[in-house]
Amino acid sequence: MLSAESVDTIPDDVRTLYLESFPPEERIPFGNTMRTFGRGGDLEIFTDGGVFVGFCYSFEYDGSVFLVYIATRPELRGKGYGAMMLDEMRRIKAGRNIFLVLEGTDGSPEDAMRIRRRGFYLRNGCTDTGVRILSDDVYFDSMTVQGTNTEGSMVRTVTMYEDIHNGRV
């Protein structure tokens, strides 16, 4: 049974999975991430029978939740945990608009993985918004996970997230 626990530190297993799962240009220093804790940032650790499965780092501002990172341990991918984690985030953040961003295709060697990732989100009830969001100097496609996300609400949430994690607020 999948369970989630909100934490206010970044455990070693999350740090390792984070470094394995996201390319260097998309990683945020751990200190910047921790700067958001208690100010809208939330880290959920997912376990199954006490075994670490993955994590979701999100940021909430003004009724919108930005799923910044969601990752499942590589050896557990394809076993339904990612879908369960998304469903649990929908439950945890019930009544709030949830969105995420992901890389678009650009002819790079990572395109096959990016297409698979987009397919995963579509199969699990997410919808394309048609809005590209600038986050830390990189443009991303955006998807709705839950609720109604407007371009304005997503931009405001990402901007506040960046202002806090970059130490401007």
Image (tube, rainbow, N blue to C red):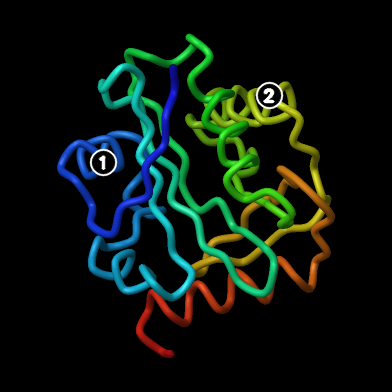
In this orientation, which residue lies closer to the viewer: 60 or 24?
Answer: 60
The residues tagged by marks 2 and 1 sit, at their Cα atoms, a distance apart of: 24 Å
> Which residue is located at x 20 percent, y 36 percent?
13
Horizontal side of residue 148 vs 118, given as left or right: right
- The image quarter in which residue 5 lies: top left
Quadrant holding the C terminus:
bottom left
- Residue 22, given in percent of the width and then of the height, sits at 37, 42
Instruction: Give the residue furthest to the bottom.
Output: 169
- Which residue lies under the disc numbered 1? 14
Of marks 2 and 1, which one's residue comes earlier in the chain? 1
Horizontal side of residue 139 vs 43, given as left or right: right
- Residue 109, given in percent of the width and then of the height, sits at 48, 30
> Which residue is located at x 53 percent, y 14 percent?
80
Quadrant holding the N terminus:
top left
Mark 1: which secondary structure? helix
- Which residue lies under the disc numbered 2? 119
